[in-house]
Structure formats: C-alpha cells, structure tokens
Image (cartoon, rainbow, N blue to C red):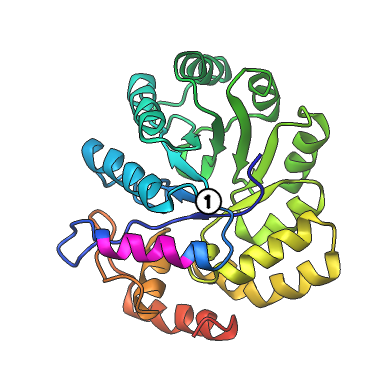
Amino acid sequence: MITGSIVAMVTPMHPDGEVDWASLEQLIEFHVDNGTAAIGAVGTTGEASTLDMKEHEEVIRFAVDKCAGRIPVVAGTGGNSTREAMHLTRAAKSAGADAALLVTPYYNKPTQEGLYQHYCYIAENVDIPQILYNVPGRTACDMLPETALRLAEVDNIIGIKEATGDLERAQFLIENAPKDFAIYSGDDATAMELMLMGGHGDISVTANVSPKAMASMCAAAIAGDRELATRLNDLLMPLHTNLFVEANPIPVKWALTVMGLIPSGIRLPLTPLSAPMHDIVRKALTESGVI
C-alpha cells in the first residue's frame, strides 16, 4: 500500500502549450529529493483533460522511466468512456506504472450500478492495482460510499481518492472498508483530519509547491501525532485554500512558474491565473515559507 503524500503533479508546458519534458524531469527529481511518497501523473492537476491520448500515454511512460523505481507512479487513466479508460489503464500497465487512478465517468451521469460495472469491467480486464477517484464537484457524478465498498471487494481495486472533503463519509469508509483498502484524501484542506481518522494519505495539489512539508505533515497524521501534524498543516493552510482561487491547476501552475520550476504554459480552455489573483497566491507561498 502506498501511504503518505502523493503529489497530483502538474504537466509542465512551454508558452506555446507543448509539453516541457525537461521541466517534467526536474519536477520528478524535486519530489524524489523532498520525500514525496509517489508521483500522481496525468490526473486532474496534470491536465489529463487537455492532453491528447498519445501525450497522455507518453507522460505516464516518461514519469515511470524517470522515477526508475525510486518512488511509485500512480497514473491517471480515467475517462467517461469505459473503453477509453480501459485503453489508458492498459497503457499504464504496459509503461510499468505501479497503480492507476480512475476518475468516475464525467458528463454522462451513470447510475451507481453503472459505476460498479464500469470499474469491475476495467479491473477484470487489466491486471494493475486500481484506485477509484470520486470528485463530484468536477464530474457531476458522486460515487456513494456503498458503491465504493462494493468495489472494495473486487480484485485489483485497492483504494479510493475521496475528494468531497466530507469527513463523515471518510470515517464511514475507513470503518467499513477492508483493512487493505486504502482511503486517500483528494481535498488538501481536510486531508489531515482524514489521515488522523485512519486514512492512508493525500493525493495532493499543495505537494506540488511544498513537497517536504506535505510529506512531513502526512507522516505525522498517519502516525497519529496530532500536535505535529496540526503545526505543519497550519503552515500549509494558505496553500490548501488559495491554490484553488481559480480552477485547478491554474493557480498551482502559476505558483510553480514563480518558483522557477516550470514555464508559464497552460492549454485552453484553461487560461493563465488572472492578474487580481497573483497577490493572493504569492502571499500564500510567502506565508507557507515556499518563497
């Protein structure tokens, strides 16, 4: 089981929108050096929605190659088409990813039974550990806890990224899921409490800019050290809050550009961080000790 701070890593791009492979390698080294537990490649923050299929597969393979077994790679392979999600999940397995992260099918609003069958079909056809990803604020599709628990019994389905920020739901999952089923937060602001309840980690946007502090906070929370976890989390809270002043990954890509780690590229329909938000994000970086 992967535990701790899993970075939902951005995909760096040149100003013309082409993937910046050199910066991507630099980011991977940044996370290896600063204690990140695993790389989350090509998820929401990695602009899976703006990369084409070939680029999506290339970024996964590149991350696996550059991590070179030093830390695991969790590849984003979800889609609103079951066939497309299965294709990407097979590509992640072929590339050597350690696990796949599959968002609930968006836009078409499947029933709970449709969700169950979607995930079962992929799990039965692709032999790679798979993590469910529930983020109804983006997908208009909420996987209910009862459905997640049904899927927790399926071979290859090893965990869930629960991004609602609903701690009562998280507690229910932690108490009722099999002990070897990982419960990850997908909401930085409530991740500490989820881990103190017995959750296993945070698939984190904040970790992009403050990986060492996030790794330490997650380790403390998982160990049950509320005092240390709270002290670290209080330092990180400006980032948890203000890296979402516009749609993710707009603020975090701007922050990484300010830090000198990536160029300013982002793809339409996403646009660069609007000028009125610059001071807000810069202040969060300062208050959290990043710059």
Quadrant containing the N terminus is top right
Q: Which residue is mark 1?
A: 71
Residue at 45% across, 14% down: 125
Question: At which x and y percent is residue 156?
Answer: 58, 23
Is 118 included in the stretch rendered in magenta?
Answer: no
Q: Is residue 245 visible?
A: no
Residue at 53% across, 40% down: 136
Prevailing secondary structure class for the magenta stretch in the rendered image: helix
Q: Secondary structure at mark 1?
A: loop
**Quadrant hosting residue 237:** bottom right
Front-lying residue, 272 or 227? 227
Q: Amino acid at mark 1?
A: Ile
Question: How many other residues sit within 10 Å of disc 1, few (<14), some (14-19) or many (≥20)?
Answer: many
Q: Is residue 267 visible?
A: yes
Query: Is 37 situated left or right of 255 in this image?
Result: right
The span shown in magenta is 22-30
**Quadrant hosting residue 267:** bottom left
Residue at 75% across, 52% down: 195
Question: At which x and y percent is residue 182?
Answer: 68, 37
Does residue 75 sit above or below 109 in this rendering?
A: below
**Quadrant hosting residue 61:** top left
Does residue 102 sit above or below 33 in this rendering?
A: above
Question: At which x and y percent is residue 152?
Answer: 67, 24
